[in-house]
DNA sequence: ATTCGGAATAATAATCATAATCATTAAAAC
DNA sequence: GTTTTAATGATTATGATTATTATTCCGAAT
């Protein structure tokens, strides 16, 4: 394993994730980085998104129109998804999972995360 | 259009959905009904699930392991998903969307629904 | 009962996002 | 610089879902 740093492309993917709040899809990242890395492969994007997700650097938010959307903001927060254009917007609430509801659910051993998504129409649509 | 009733197969799919709280996938429904309808086609299951969703009879809950899971219980409630076995369990909370958080979100015109999913390990795993 | 017409279906092929493969390249470690 | 391992590009495979199309079903009109 590379001890201290990511490879150049992985670094670029992660930094792009950090620089945006648009909750990108793999395709969006690929298109965005292609000018800078003309030899970038879509497979590399998928591979690194999964890797970044596995090591906790990014989180999968939801699937919109069949495409997985990711978020580099890993502090707990919720999301809004526009049903018309698919835009994903961060939603911050004072509540955390314990305040939202009981984590003691019938048939459940342990709860360690939650995902709250609002649906509706965004101001552009 | 058939005025009053669903076709036999559509009726069977919907009744199976009503009779279970396992939040079935298309594949599960297909396998379950195949003995009763040996000529049932998987495409028919997909077609009717979408149709039932479009007319509001059932709701899509979430995607687990790449498979869409549905619920015939359409009154507002939340869900728990086991990260190990993929089981989906109903979660009932007193809260509704207005109590959970602000529906007045920056960049959002209107919110009309929400989806709250808890993740963790179920008692069987 | 027979015919008619639209809805529903089975079978099949197409789609499309994602995953796996594998030969090659890049970058650490030494 | 050489070795060794990780990362990548190109390509193919996978698998859930959707579209297509010819056929079947089923109620209604005759």
Image: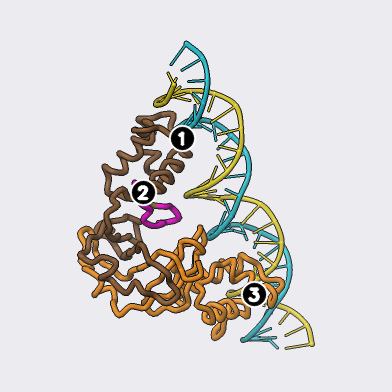
Chain colours: A brown, B orange, C yellow, D cyan
For residue B99, say whether it is visible.
Answer: yes
Magenta-colored segment: predominant secondary structure: strand
Contact, mark 1 vs mark 3 (Cβ under 8 Å): no
Crowd class of label 2 (few under 14; some 14 to 19; many from 20; radius 10 Å): few
Whether A6 is drawn above or below B77: the answer is: above
What is the chain letter for disc 1?
A
Crowd class of label 3 (few under 14; some 14 to 19; many from 20; radius 10 Å): some
The spot of residue C7 in percent (x, y) is 58, 75
Q: Which residue is mark 1?
A: A41
Decide whether residue A67 is among the magenta residues. Answer: yes
Residue A61 vs residue B105, the one in the foreground: A61
Callout 2 and callout 3 share a chain:
no
Marks 1/3: CA–CA distance: 43 Å
Q: Please state the extent of the stretch shown in magenta in the rendering.
A: A56-68
Callout 1 and callout 3 share a chain:
no
Number of the front mark, 1 or 2: 2
Q: Which residue is mark 3?
A: B33
Residue at 24 percent of width and 64 percent of height: B109
What is the secondary structure assignment of the residue under circle 2?
Answer: loop
Q: Which residue is mark 2?
A: A56
């Amino acid at each position: 394993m590379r001890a201290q740093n990511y490879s150049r492309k992985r670094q670029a993917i992660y930094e792009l994730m950090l620089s945006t709040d648009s909750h990108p899809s793999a395709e969006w990242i690929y298109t965005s980085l292609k000018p800078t890395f003309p030899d970038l492969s879509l497979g590399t994007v998928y591979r690194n998104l999964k890797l970044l997700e596995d090591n906790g650097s990014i989180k999968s938010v939801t699937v919109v129109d069949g495409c997985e959307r990711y978020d580099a903001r890993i502090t707990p927060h919720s999301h809004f998804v526009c049903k018309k254009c698919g835009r994903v917007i961060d939603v911050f609430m004072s509540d955390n999972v314990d305040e939202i509801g009981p984590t003691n659910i019938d048939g459940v051993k342990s709860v360690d995360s939650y995902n709250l998504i609002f649906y509706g129409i965004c101001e552009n649509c």
